[in-house]
Image (cartoon, helix red, strand yellow):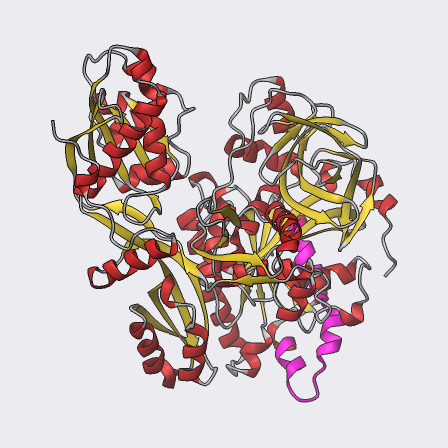
Amino acid sequence: MKFKATDQILKIIGDKKLIRNFGVIAHVDHGKTTMSDSLLASSGIISPSVAGQALALDSMKLEQDRQMTIVQANVTLLYEKDNQEYVINMIDTPGHIDFTGRVTRSLRAIDGAVVVSDSVEGIMTQTETVTRQALEERVRPVLYINKIDRLIKELRLTPEKMQEWLLEIVTNFNRLIDIYAEPEYKDKWKVSIQDGSVSFGSAKDKWGFNADVMKKKGISFKDIFAAYSEGGSVKELAEKAPLYDAVLGMVVKHHPPPDVAQKYRIPKIWKGDLESDIGKALLNCDDNGPAIMMIVNMTVDPAAGPVAIGRLFSGRIKDGDRIHIIDTKREGRIQSVNFFMGNQREMVGELAAGNIPALLGLEYARAGQTISTISGVNTFEGIQYVSEPVVQIAVEPKHPKDLPRLVEALNRITIEDPNLVVKINEESGETVIAGMGVLHLEIATALIADAKVDIVTSQPLINYRETIRGSAGPIMAKSPNRHNKIFMKVEPLDEKVAEMIRNGTLNEYKDKKEVQKILKEAGWDGDDAKRVMRFDTRGNVMVDGTKGVQFVQESTDSILSGFDDTMKEGPLTREQVRGCKFTFHHFVPHEDPAHRGLSQLGPASRRACMGAMLLAQPVLLEPTLGIEVRIPQELIGNVAGVISGKRGKVLNMEQKGVVNIITGEIPASETFDLSEVMRGQTAGKAMWNTHFKAWTPVPNSILSTIVADLRKRKGLSPEPPTADEFVDKE
């Protein structure tokens, strides 16, 4: 197998029909990176003898130590099928739920996905989550069932029983496509063993096959069974049916080339005018159109600075081009255009549409942005993440002199991972990092330590949210000079509408008529639907309910500033507010504009919002995690005990082959010592993972303790304020 040089790839890359962009997605530990090793070996990037152990795409030291993928890795491969060479751009993504943000971003750059599933465990929650995300981005899935050797060694199935077992997994996977795919792709995209869109194999032993390979090489399940029986040779099987042939063969046959995929993907991910010249260039993946690219991933190279990796949807991009970052209206200049061969960057000087370039020199670019050689292009749709940051820790440098280096390290980490949120509390001066879970934060602190900064971290803390159970108002609050009166009502916001605000379906830039239509369909009355003043992205809304009052228009901004402040920091514990609908009911302004400026109306509006919330049965919400535990039969009681001992509940138990799977839910605040307790109760035999599920009200029995703790931590008095402090009487 000769090593394929970059110039060979550049020869082929001109023909769109010979390019494929695909990603590897799956549940944690189902064998994505091990499978990717075999694919790299087929292109001569790593030696075939170490494939399966090298985990070459886990290039970070942390990834190798923990044996798990943390960041997505890009690589360009050459593959020959029926005497035709193809260029394949592959992205290996993480499986752990704390890193789904990276999976979501990677999906934007690819047209097809290979979903990897463990043969014994079948389709697990995370497999379902990533498949759903792929279908929402119109990325076509194919299925690879890994670890087939477990069916023979652990479950001791006969070849006939094996086929029944595997058919069940394929049926379950097609059920997902049935639920989540859009109507026109439901039947087209189902996978089937007959047409070769399902492959079987063992990544560790480097063999694999599908229907096409079976016909060509004459292999059947009996041969696999024989290879693992006495006197059989797994090595011979791997030589006869190498894994990369099955997987890459499936990619070339079933995944679309970029010019075909963009015809149906662009209408979903780009909201500009498809009839315009730009729209046509994007739909046709046109090399001669303007260069338009979406950045899906940023890495920081210690020597070269930020590297922006993304999908070029139209035009050509070359060294020295001046480009516009559309989202932030900045300009930049590309120093060099590269692509990735494994963890090595290769300079190529120029790339055409349909590829995944890595650009140097754009220091202001960030993941999720649109860049183009012309200005005034519509941006791509924002990326919708599955969960939000729920756990946080406070960090500070051990030695004050290291503060600038800590800031630099945090800056770099947030460029690479936009799902980590860093905020500085102005009152206490502490730096807080919020992430998707405890593991996400552990990795972040390990990366800071790699930057040679000694830090002290607090115990992990949970993010809470505030909301209301009842409604209140109208109540009145006066401005500090007592000359303006603001009347405010509040009620819980319908969950459907709140969700539409959070995912961007409802926002301020949307056409007013469209907003009215959506709100009316959700059951709002016509007047309210017309008079929305502000959608707050946390899932709150402010409606103008005043009738015939003077000076409302010119005071709107000041009144909204008070509303915004309250949504950032609610009255109970100064946590973010969600799910509230405020109605600005009535306004008695002072005649003289000097007496009704921002400094008067802002505080009045904030007081009115706070007072109304405190009268409407305010409540604290905590993040609840779904938990899935895999254990042997005899330990079910112990695990159920652990979950219920941590204020959790068991929702379901089922048996899959030799393992039992318990699903339940558990408050995030109870999970910090979950691993020690679980290991103690199950002697280390339990495998589990958690994922963010929902925000649920804190039980009344512990509400006052939690509120007092949170307030003390923020340097406030332990008792929350009462409504009387904000509401004014005549």
Image position of 22 (left or right of 511): right
> In this orientation, does residue 214 appear?
no
Give yes or no for residue 51 being in the magenta stretch: no
Q: Is residue 230 magenta?
A: yes
Residue farthest along the bottom direction in this orientation: 230
Count of picture labels: 0
| Vertical relation: 297 (above or below) 692 | above
Residue placed at 44% from the left, 46% from the top? 427
Q: Quadrant of residue 529?
A: top left
Image-quadrant location for residue 582: top left
Q: Is residue 35 left or right of residue 674?
A: right
364 or 223, which is in the foreground? 364
Residue 258 visible? The answer is yes
Q: Residue 172: image x %, image y %?
A: 44, 60
Prevalent SS, magenta region: helix
- For the record, the magenta segment spans 224-251
Up/down of 537 relative to 666, above or below: above
Relative to the observer, which residue lies in front, 140 or 171? Answer: 140
Residue 100 position within the rendered picture, expressed as x and y whole percent measured from the top left? 52, 53
The N terminus sits in image quarter: bottom right
Q: Position of residue 706 (x, y in %)?
A: 29, 59
